[in-house]
Image (tube, rainbow, N blue to C red):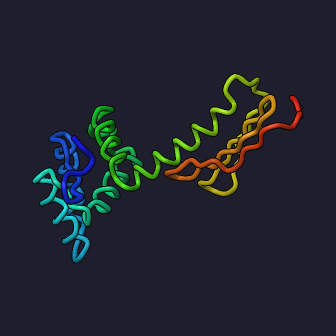
């Protein structure tokens, strides 16, 4: 399925439709008021396999919650988790995360073929970690936070060496 059909609608596959419907059936009884209305509108859209742009943030949050909590894997096995992960990648947040990962992988490419001298993981604060890689002629630091990995710094050159 394409990410978006005409008019900015996110088109769901039958597998995505089924899994999202199950998540909505589990969530809706716990909601009331405006939140319930929004998710009921999402449920109607999911039943048609077409989620309009204005409901995509609700869909994205629902799918992210199922994935982040491990619920998707527990209930739907690895295949269901894969289906929901692929769906998440088609949402604005998923596309943004994919862009971040592409940038990180481009930066990591400068380390290819170099001798690794050191790797260090540190905690800035709870939920915010850094991974520092020291190689022959280059160093790189990644920032890892919930839901995102970003390039924090890269330095090419210098001499250093194993310390």
Left or right: residue 21 compared with residue 105:
left
Place of residue 98 in the rendered image (x, y in percent of width and height, measured from the top left): 46, 45
**What residue occupies the far bottom of the structure in this picture?**
33
Query: Residue at 26% of width from left, 71% of height from top?
Result: 35
Query: Residue at 76% of width from left, 38% of height from top?
Result: 139
Place of residue 68 in the rendered image (x, y in percent of width and height, measured from the top left): 41, 48
Left or right: residue 139 compared with residue 15:
right
Report which quarter residue 13 is drawn in.
Answer: top left
Query: Residue at 29% of width from left, 32% of height from top?
Result: 79
Q: Nearer the viewer, residue 46 or 160?
A: 160
Place of residue 43 in the rendered image (x, y in percent of width and height, measured from the top left): 16, 59
Q: Nearer the viewer, residue 80 or 30?
A: 80
**Does 50 appear above or below 109?**
below
Place of residue 65 in the rendered image (x, y in percent of width and height, measured from the top left): 36, 53
Left or right: residue 6 compared with residue 150:
left
Q: Quadrant of the N terminus?
A: top left
**Does 138 appear above or below 98?**
above
Q: Quadrant of the C terminus?
A: top right
Query: Residue at 33% of width from left, 41% of height from top?
Result: 86
Give the mark count: 0
**What residue occupies the far front of the structure in this picture?**
6
Report which quarter residue 9 is drawn in.
Answer: bottom left
Report which quarter residue 54 is drawn in.
Answer: bottom left
């Amino acid at each position: 399925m394409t990410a978006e059909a005409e008019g900015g609608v996110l088109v769901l596959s039958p597998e995505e439709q089924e899994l999202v419907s199950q998540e909505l059936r589990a969530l809706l009884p716990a909601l009331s008021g405006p939140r319930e209305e929004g998710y009921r509108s999402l449920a109607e859209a999911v039943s048609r396999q077409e989620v309009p742009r204005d409901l995509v943030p609700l869909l994205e949050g629902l799918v992210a919650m199922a994935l982040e909590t491990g619920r998707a894997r527990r209930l739907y096995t690895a295949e269901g988790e894969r289906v929901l992960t692929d769906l998440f990648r088609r949402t604005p947040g998923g596309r943004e995360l994919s862009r971040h990962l592409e940038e990180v992988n481009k930066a990591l490419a400068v380390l290819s073929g170099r001798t690794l001298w050191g790797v260090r993981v540190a905690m800035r604060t709870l939920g915010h970690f850094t991974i520092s890689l020291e190689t022959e002629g280059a160093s790189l630091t990644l920032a890892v936070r919930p839901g995102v990995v970003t390039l924090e710094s890269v330095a090419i050159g210098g001499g250093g060496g194993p310390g």
